[in-house]
Structure formats: C-alpha cells, structure tokens
Amino acid sequence: MLNEQFSGGRGLEVAGLHYTYNDKEIVDVFVGDKSSSEKIVANKSYTVVLNNYLTGGGDNFPTFTKLKNSEIIGIDTDTFINYLKAMKMCQQPIHRVAFKLKNSVLSC
C-alpha cells in the first residue's frame, strides 16, 4: 500500500510509523516515531484511522478499498467540527510569536 504513492499516488502523510525507501520501493516500515526500531510484522493486524476519501481509494490508493474489518466511526469533517465545538474559548488573547532566522534557512 505504501508503494502505491510511488506509482501514481500523491504521497501519503502518516503518523505512528515511519519507513525507509530507495528509488523503487519501501524498504522497511517501523511502528512508532523515528526513534523506534520496531519493524512492522507482515501478517499482524494493526488499527489505523483513515479519512473517508482515502478509504474510497482517493489519491490513487486502491488498496484502501479492500480493507478487512473496517468500521466507520464518523465522517472526518464532522468529527473535526464536533471537536472544535467542544473546545473551550481562550480567556486570554493569543499573541503571535515572530522568529528571526539566521540566513533565512531552516535546518533539521
């Protein structure tokens, strides 16, 4: 499924796993953040959350249309709207923070 982004897919944003790849395919997939070395197990089941666009095969990811044991817990936009409605109002004003960058270059 991850390799589909290299054959017509538009790039998949992921959280909770990371992977290494070469110029042809994904080499290794790891569960957790970048410091984790726990490799994903091929025949193990994992719980994932996807939006309804991807589960319908959007962005050229047809594998998502073949999910097993899938359950709809809500439409992603409705869930986000309900989350925002449940948020409390800030009692203090929010101020912007400006950063001055040396040479205008960010490095990681």
Image (cartoon, grey):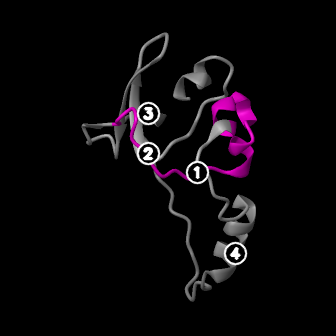
Residue 44, horizontal then vertical, whole percent: 39, 41
Tag 3 residue: 103
Which residues lie in the magenta part? Answer: 40-65
Eye-nearest disc, 4 or 2: 2
Residue 65, horizontal then vertical, whole percent: 69, 38
Picture quadrant of residue 77: bottom right
What is the C-alpha distance between the residues marked 1 and 2? 10 Å
Mark nearer the N terminus (4 vs 1): 1
Residue 27, horizontal then vertical, whole percent: 38, 20
Instruction: Determine which of the numbered discs, if any, sits on residue 82 in the image.
Output: 4
Q: What kind of element bears circle 4?
A: helix
Q: Mark 4 touching mark 3, by CB under 8 A?
A: no
Tag 1 residue: 69
Mark 1: give few (<14), some (14-19) or many (20+) Cα within 10 Å.
Answer: few
Mark nearer the N terminus (4 vs 2): 2
What is the C-alpha distance between the residues marked 2 and 3? 47 Å
Picture quadrant of residue 84: bottom right
Residue displayed at 54% across by 22% down:
3
- Of 57 and 96, the residue lying toward us: 57
Q: Mark 1 touching mark 2, by CB under 8 A?
A: yes
Q: Mark 3 touching mark 1, by CB under 8 A?
A: no
Tag 2 residue: 45
Q: Mark 4: which amino acid?
A: Asn
Q: Is residue 37 magenta?
A: no
Q: Is residue 31 left or right of residue 57?
A: left
Mark 3: give few (<14), some (14-19) or many (20+) Cα within 10 Å.
Answer: few
Q: Mark 3: which amino acid?
A: Asn
What is the C-alpha distance between the residues marked 4 and 2? 29 Å
Q: What kind of element bears circle 2?
A: loop
What is the C-alpha distance between the residues marked 4 and 3? 42 Å
- Of 8 and 47, the residue lying toward us: 47
Q: What kind of element bears circle 3?
A: helix
